[in-house]
Image (tube, grey):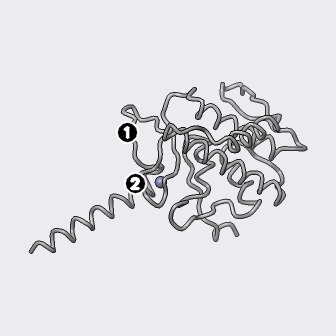
Amino acid sequence: MTARFPDFRLGKVLATSFTGTLSERHGEPVERIPTPNRLIDWLAEYGLAVDSCTPAQLEHARELREAIHAAATAAAIHDALPAAAVHVINDHSAQGRAAAILTPDGDRQWRLTPTSSVEDALSVIAADAISLIAGERDGKLALCASPTCQAAFFDTSQSRTRRWCDMNTCGNREKKARFYANQRKNTGSH
Ligand SMILES: [Zn+2]
């Protein structure tokens, strides 16, 4: 049943992968969590498994997503952080009661409370966004060079010169576009 929904783009960074569930914001936007069940599927991919999600909780998730997108975009271009977005991120961060658990193998897992697990999961995402925007992690927030995308992503490359939010989609498309543009130029000159 889920096959007819858009695929997820699963990046390594939780908060910016979450904002990537709405892609092509400056082109024809693709909503990758169109239903509560798709949000459940997405959260499970990041170790934040929840049993259920209501349409209202999905709305809250999207509100958080857009707030993170706005704040991360401002941070990437060294603009003042939008106050409303900061407020939404902080509210979501404070609302959850997720606990970080250390497994016997030394991995971190999140333990969510059974009664408000979506809120707990969103608080983990909000806290992840806060650590990125506050500059506490090794890397740099940047905007995707694709004009129809312009997604905020977290560049952890050594040179900090990554240009695309995702190499397999935006990066590839750009490369192809350049290839065809060159081909046209070459055939036109003959
Ligand atoms: Zn992109």
At horizontal 50% and vertical 65% (from top left) the residue drawn is: 27
Amino acid type, label 2: Gly
Q: Position of residue 134 (x, y in %)?
A: 60, 30
Q: Position of residue 180 (x, y in %)?
A: 27, 67
* Badge 1 or badge 2: first in the primary sequence: 1
Residue ID for mark 2 = 171
Amino acid type, label 1: Thr
**Side (left or right) of 7 relative to 36:** left
Q: Counting other residues with Cα less than 10 Å from the Cα at mark 2, is it few (<14), some (14-19), or many (20 or more)?
A: some
At horizontal 45% and vertical 58% (from top left) the residue drawn is: 169
**Residue 159, quarter of the rendered image:** top left
Gap between marks 1 and 2 measured at Cα: 13 Å
Q: Is mark 2 within 8 Å of ligand 1?
A: yes
Q: Nearer the viewer, mark 1 or mark 2?
A: 1
Looking at the rendered structure, which numbered label has been put on residue 161?
Answer: 1
- Residue furthest right in the image: 115
Viewport quadrant of the N terminus: bottom right
At horizontal 68% and vertical 66% (from top left) the residue drawn is: 2
**Side (left or right) of 156 relative to 43:** left
Q: Is residue 27 above or below residue 110?
A: below
